[in-house]
Amino acid sequence: MELCAMTFAMPPGISPPLAVSVPILEPILEQLRRERNEAVAPQAEAGPVAEPCTGEAGLRSSSLGCHASWYRENLSHCSEAMLQYEWAWMNGRLAALRQCRAGEGGELACPPEPRLEGLLGESQLFRTLLLQEFASRGLRPQPPRGTVVASEEAWEITSASVRQEWGIQP
């Protein structure tokens, strides 16, 4: 599966996803393939079973593959309105990280350089997963239509007014 080869007709004003080098993604994609195959094929041998990658484990783990599985799972439970919010949220996150990398972070709390590059790579992968979710549902990203809270992804929105602006049901 070639993540960077995907093309979409992007709405005006929204930049296309940045290509992420395949060597970075290949181990992640391989891990995701193994997880998918293990979930489908029953274990032949009895013995200890590895704990599945959950949101909580994904947050504690430094494994990008686990984070990607957790993110994909969250996306699968999103409504169309939530996906549109997540699109705007992810583009804002990437813009902020790029500002940090360019030394233009201003008032942003920019992480140290090695962490910044990791967050950029992770965010670009997540943006690709988000585009895949849109495509799998026959949807297209739209320009933002409401307030985006930088600290809250689509499944974390606490503000009733933000939920209402985006048409996200409580």
Image (cartoon, rainbow, N blue to C red):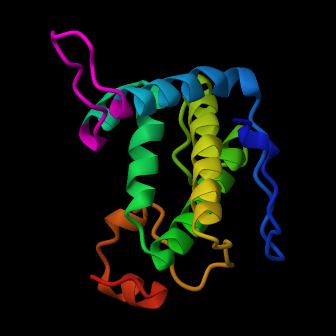
Vertical relation: 87 (above or below) 40: below
Residue 151 placed where, x, y %? 41, 59
Image-quadrant location for residue 153: bottom left
Instruction: Locate residue 12 relative to residue 144 in the image: left or right.
Output: right
168 lies above or below 100: below
Residue under the point 39% across and 55% down: 74
Camera-nearest residue between 33 and 5? 33
Q: Report the number of discs.
A: 0
- Seen from the viewer's position, the closer of residues 134 and 16 is 134
* Quarter-of-image position of residue 93: bottom right
Q: Position of residue 148 (x, y in %)?
A: 50, 73
Q: Which residues are magenta?
A: 39-56
Q: Residue 165, how many percent across, how many down?
A: 46, 89
Q: Residue at x 34, y 70 (%)?
A: 157
Magenta: main secondary structure equals loop
Quadrant housing residue 120: top right
Residue 49 forms part of the magenta stretch? yes
Q: Is residue 54 visible?
A: yes
Tell me the quadrant of the picture where the C terminus can be found: bottom left
Which quadrant: the N terminus?
top right
Task: State whether residue 137 is above or below residue 35.
Answer: below
Q: Please report the residue visible at 65 percent of the width from the left and 28 percent of the height from the top.
A: 25
Taking the image as shown, residue 95 lies to the left or right of residue 50, namely: right
Q: Is 123 in the magenta?
A: no
Question: Above or below — where is 52 with respect to 17?
Answer: above
Estimate the x, y position of residue 106 in percent, counting from the top left.
64, 52
User: At x 43% / y 33%, what residue is drawn?
Assistant: 36
